[in-house]
Amino acid sequence: MRAGNGRGMPVVSYVARRTGLSALVALGVVVLTYLIARVVPGDPAGVWAGPRASAAQRARVRAELGLDRPVHEQIVSYVAGVWRGDWGVSVHTHRPVRSDLFGLLPATLQLVLAGLALGLAVGVPAGLVAARWHGRWPDALVRTGALLSASMPVFWLALLLQTVFASRLGLLPIAGGYDRTVLAAHPVTGVTGLPLLDAVLTGNRAAAASYARHLVLPALVVATYPAAVAARLVRAGVLDALGEGHIQMARSLGFPERAVLGRFALRLVWNPVLQLGALVFGYSLVNTFLVEAVFDCPGLGLYAVDSVRSLDAPAVVGVTLLVALVYLAANLAVDLAQAVLDPRIRLG
Amino acid sequence: MTASPSLPLLLRVRRAPGALRGRWTLVLTAGGLVLVAALALLAPVLAPYPPLATDLARTLRPPSSAHWFGTDELGRDVLSRVLYGARTGPVVAVTVVGVSLLVGTATGLAAGYCGGWTDEALMRLTDVFLAVPALLLALALTTVLAPGPAGLTVALVVTWWPWYARLVRGEAASVTGRAYIEACRTLGLGHRRILLRHVLPNASTPLLVQASTDVGGVLLVASGLSFLGLGPQPPAPDWGLMVEESQNYFTTHWWLGTFPGLAIMVVAALCFLLGDALRDRLDPRHTPRI
């Protein structure tokens, strides 16, 4: 988050410094999660070998998994493995963690991105409306709505929506990420990796409709928090901006109020919105874990919960590492975007 | 959020009515939270039934005069369980914030005051913790610690302290170079005294605001973890766990999950409101927007 403090620091060295720091943090995350997973009580080798394995078999599995070596050696070999693309083998699915994770990541990313897009689409106009009619009933409505959306437990909202729209009204599917029968008849070929986008891009209407119908309720739930944050930020930012000279200038030049808010004041708000963007992204990313658990959508969340329940250390470390990497990448992207857009940041 | 210094008049005019109404928000939200604390403390007196008492003759009854919030699948009174639930989730949240505050403040003061390598090392350490979203890190940690309120608290403290460290470090670093701190040093005051009496007070307002908001945030994350089965274990009356247990009955018996969920929402909303009200009242750099 910290900007370069050298005078006239060029963009390239800012980018290099920022990227280097992210790599260092990623290394730290690996060590941290590995240390956590290593102290998992219980016996991963026992889980792996099965309940009826003999002591000798368990010992062989321990040696095979490298659990008999000192912790620091294990970390070094784990980091080296991750670097080579070998993330270890999951204890509960018996498949390589990396292929498990990268198979599930697109579904989760799709849910987060849909939720964020929906949240911004609702939150930004809501914030503008609140600022436009500041102190009147639309403002009160938006503020109350934002407060309630931020304080609602995600899993509870998911259950409520599932009950009302899926069970009672029967409008949308109750659970799952897609219809197996539809996908079997209309297989989706990957272009971008995001299932819904692929289906749309390849003109596969049946599959796209199936994905979209299953995505509506989970995305709505994920969208509530970003919508609340965006509404609050935009409202506060626009109200602050209205005190600025150039806004009053625009007003006195006779621009309609719509243009003053939408064209001039809103421009000053993007920076704080972008700044919180990465944080909200991270929060929404883990919110999807709870949402996936309720709607039983296959994704990183369900995988993480299953791994935790079966004491699957390589899988837990893998999920944590992957989410941290995605989150770091989002942070980095935000910082770089800001540095490019706002010379005050890169020049310090 | 810094107001432009060239418009003092405008700010003062805007501030006056807001400040007055802000006081009411503060009184009301603080009162609401005191009420929640009272309900938690007096749960044994107020609850109409023991929270664990099953009554298999009266299972899944809808709300009535005998059971205001209805009964669950084992015939337990939902109202009593919600009241007792105020003794786990919110208590975990307050404890987590309190301990994180202590750890984070100490770390932040050390980093901001010492500067140099200490600062760099400590802040990179917080970077590592902050790179993993709280719920995920806590999820990984709760598997290590035995599931239950204690494990939940420890896991959340580990994920929450870096925020306070960052906050305090920023405030401490900004005043450490100031003349009055130099003066304290010249007068021969000990580091401890300078830190606690002259550096820390600068951070007290943002810390207070952050802490009251965070109690709500931690409550939401903690409830999420108990919803996943990593918090208090059945038959404990915990709000997140109650929502989880109601999952199979939600369509047909709405009262099982609705009331505990509402309880989480109300307490979290009160905490967020309190944080906003405190900032409006205490932070001179912030213009209240009522």
Image (cartoon, grey):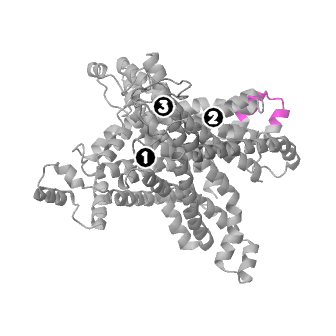
Nearest the eye: B235 or A156: B235
Q: Give how far across and how far down residue A277 sits, in percent.
A: 56, 43
Residue highlighted by disc 1: B232
Residue B138 vs B54, above or below: the answer is below
Q: Label 1 lies in what chain?
A: B
Tell which subunit mark 2 falls on. A
**Could you tell me residue B38's position as x and y percent?**
63, 46
Q: Which residue is mark 2?
A: A146
- Compared with A260, A187 (above or below) is above
Q: What is the distance, in whole Å, between disc 1 and disc 2 at their CAs?
A: 30 Å
Q: For residue B177, which numbered disc appears in the image? A: none
Left or right position of A22 against A74: right
User: Which quadrant is the N terminus of chain A positioned in?
Assistant: bottom right
Say left or right for A255 vs A328: right
Name the one closer to the observer, A11 or A51.
A51
Whether residue A291 is visible here, answered yes or no, is yes
- Using the image, name the chain to which the residue with label 3 belongs: B
